[in-house]
Amino acid sequence: MKRRTFLSYALASASLSTLPSFLNLSTAQAATTLTKANAIAALKAAVITPTALTNPATSTVRDYSGALMLAPYGMLNWYFANLALLFAFDQLTDADAFPLVKNHLNSYLRNLTSNKIILDAEFPTWNYTTGQPTSWQTPQRDRDSDDAYAATFVALAARFVTRFSKNTSTYKTETDTWWNTNKATVKSVAYLNLLVPLKSNGLTPTFRPDLPIPNHIQQNPYYSTTAEKWAACQVGYLMDNCEVHYGLKQLVTLLQAKADSEASYFNSFISIIAGGISSLYHTGSSAYRDSDATTTVSTGFYPGATCQIYPTVFQVTTELTPTRMTAAWAYFSAHASNWSTWPNNGTGLNNTPDVYPWAVIAYGTGKTTNTSLKTQGTQLVRKIESNFALTNQRPYITINELGFYLASLLALNLV
C-alpha cells in the first residue's frame, strides 16, 4: 500500500479468482456515471458493520465497525477513510454526516495502539451476501505514515465537533458528550504524532522516531543500512506537512471555541510548521521540493508536480500569496502534461485511469482564484463523472477519490 504512489488498485489479500462471479474483473462492465448522490451512497456502502472480527493467525478479536473500507471487498486504510469523510463532509446532510463520521471516529479511537498510532487492516475472508468482511489480518505495510494518519484524524474530529456542537444543532448534546469523553485522546494523538516528533526545520517526519522502523521499510532492499532506514522514516514531506498544518488549525479553531486552556499551546506550533513548509519552496525553480530529503525540485508528475498544489488543497494560508500560488500552479501545469484532459495513460486495472490524483487536482483548482484553472477543473470533473465506475463495477475504487470528487463539486460551484 503506497500512499505516495497514487493508488489505482486495492483489494484485500484475496486473489481475483476468489471473488464471486459478479465481481470478476475479467468481464468488462459498463461504467455508471458518477453523481453527488451515488458518490455519497458509495461512501455509505463502504461502512464496515460486523462488531467482532477475528484474526485467524492470532485469534485476536477487533471491532472495526463504523470504519470505511477502501473499496468494496477492499482493505481498511485509515488515512484514506479520514480523507474521504473530511472532504465529503460539507456535502453530507446532518442526518448522514453525524452517524457516518461519529461511528468512524469511534472505530478509530477503539483501534488506536497504546502508543496512539493506528494500523491498517486487511480482510482475508468475506460474506459475499452482505459484502462484509468475516476476519482480519495486519498487512505487511501496516501504515503508510504516522503524521498524515494522525493529522487527518484530528482534522476530522475537530470539524465534526465544530459542526455539531453549535447551539442550533440537533446533535449538540450528544456531540458535547462525545468531545468531553474523547478530547484528551484526540489531543494526545496530535501531541505524540505531530508535535513531539517535530524536527528543527519545522517539519514533522513521516514516522515517529520513538517507535520501531515499520516493517515495509525494514524489509525494503533499497535501504541497505539501518541508518538509511531510519533516515527514510524521518523525511519531512510537503504533502504530509500541509495535512499536519491543516489538522492543527482545525484543532486550534475548536479549542479556541471551547475556551480550552491548551488552545494557545497547540496554536504555537502552527507558525513553526508553516515555516517548515515555506522552507521547501525553491526560489530558483519557483516551486516546492517534495521533501526535506531533496535539494532540487522534481520534474516528474508525482510527487514533483502534484505536490505543488497541496498548499492550496490544504489552505496553508502563509503560502497562498499571489506570487507563490501562481508559481506553484504554473510549475504543476508545465510538468503534469495534459492534466485537464484525463491523461494518466491508463494506469488502473484493465487500462482504467486512476481517478484519485485527478479528483484532488479538480478540487485544488476550485480553491484558486484563477478562472482558467477553474474552467479546466470543471472539465476534469465532467471527465471523472463519465469515466468513473462505481461499486460492483469497480471493486478497486478508492473512497478518498469520492471524497475529493464531492469536495470539487462544491469548490467549483457545480452543485
Image: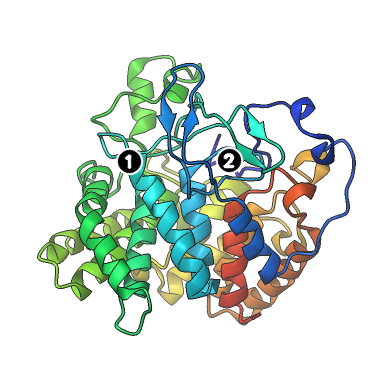
In the image: residue 314, left or right of residue 252:
right
Disc 2 crowd rating (10 Å Cα; few below 14, some 14-19, many 20+) is few
Colouring rule applied to residues: rainbow
- Residue at x-position 38% and y-position 23%: 229
Locate residue 25, reporting x and y percent.
Answer: 82, 38
Identified by mark 1, the residue type is Pro
Front-lying residue, 189 or 164: 164
- Between the residue at mark 2 and the residue at mark 1, the CA separation in whole angstroms equals 18 Å
Q: How many marks?
A: 2
- Residue at x-position 43% and y-position 55%: 103
Residue located beneath label 1 in the image: 205
- In which quadrant of the rendered view does residue 208 lie? top left
Front-lying residue, 120 or 6: 120
- Residue at x-position 16% and y-position 65%: 263
Q: Is residue 321 visible?
A: yes
- For the C terminus, give its image quadrant: bottom right
Q: Helix, strand or loop at disc 1?
A: loop
User: In the rendered structure, which disc, 2 or 1, sits on the residue that comes first in sequence?
Assistant: 2
Residue 291 is tagged as none
Q: Is residue 159 above or below residue 298?
A: below
- For the N terminus, give its image quadrant: top right
Residue located beneath label 2 in the image: 5
Disc 1 crowd rating (10 Å Cα; few below 14, some 14-19, many 20+) is many
Q: Is residue 297 visible?
A: no
Locate residue 189, reporting x and y percent.
Answer: 27, 47
Locate residue 221, reporting x and y percent.
Answer: 50, 16
Which residue is the extreme one toward the left?
261
Front-lying residue, 375 or 391: 391
- In which quadrant of the rendered view does residue 275 lie? bottom left
Mark 2–mark 1 CB contact (< 8 Å): no
Identified by mark 2, the residue type is Thr
